Amino acid sequence: MTPPAHFALSEILILIISVYSIKTFLGHKLNYATIGVLIIGATAFLATLRFGLVMHSELKSIHQLFTTLSLLLGVPLIVIEIIKKSKLVNENIILFSVLVLAIGSIYIFFQAKNLIIVITLLWLIIGIIFSFLIPREKKIFKFISIFVFSIILFNFIIRQAQVFDPILSWHFYHVMIAIWLYLITIMLTKKIAIYV
């Protein structure tokens, strides 16, 4: 079955939010998050072209490549930014972790694609833990941070479980990614944190 053109609509939403997030993260010098969202935004851009312009076969391979990169690099880089904001991990360790992430992602991509889902889930769990550990002026904001980050984990699980029919599942999954990106941007940059 050829995917319908309206699949592009929820991808456009991710693309718009990605542009906003990248601009905001650049303004706050959140470089890891910027690169992570750039990968996710590029994936949404390719999907918008693929479905919106009915270029399914022409863009299928590169879209699938960037979807994989979003899972192996995009989400982990956002998590690394959250780890950095927790101020619990040395900057050199973070840089080393990014190097290991890059090498590990290359290995998984070429040699162990069956591990992509497991690795992504592990990064999402790490993100939830460290989102709670970010210094906050009030403890309630720590729980809000957990809730915000958990959105993507539950969204990912719902997607893998195929709870909805394919069309509803597609739009639900991608709209929730857009919402998550927007809330993560607020979480990392607004004054609910000790840092500004």
Image (tube, grey):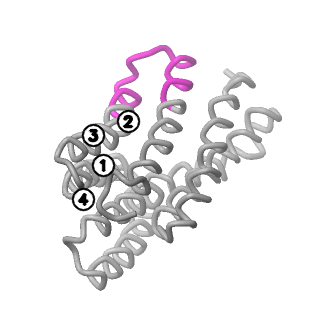
Q: What numbered label is drawn on residue 124?
A: 1
| 4 or 1: tag closer to the N-terminus | 1
Name the residue type under label 1. Answer: Leu
Give the spatial CA distance, label 1 vs label 2: 9 Å
Give the residue pinned by disc 2: 156
Residue 17 x, y percent position in the rendering? 60, 44
Q: In which quarter of the image is residue 6?
A: top right
Mark 2: amino acid: Phe
User: With 18 as the anchor, is 60 left or right in this view?
Assistant: right
Given residues 121 and 111, the one toward you in this image is 121
Mark 3 sits on what residue? 144
Q: Residue at x 70, y 31 (%)?
A: 8
Q: What element carries label 2?
A: helix
Residue 167 on the magenta span: yes
- Distance CA(mark 4)–CA(mark 2): 23 Å
Report helix, strand or loop for mark 1. helix
Residue 92 placement, left or right of 21: left
Q: Quadrant of the N terminus?
A: top right
| 144 in the magenta segment | no
Q: In the current view of this chain or complex, which residue is farthest to the top? A: 165
Label 1 CA crowd tier, 10 Å (few <14, some 14–19, many 20+): many
Q: Mark 4 points at which residue?
A: 134
Q: Are marks 1 and 2 in contact (CB under 8 Å)?
A: yes
Label located before the other in sequence (4 or 2): 4
Instruction: Provide the residue span drawn in magenta.
Output: 156-173
Cα separation, mark 2 vs mark 3, equals 19 Å
Query: Is most of the magenta stretch helix, strand or loop?
Result: helix
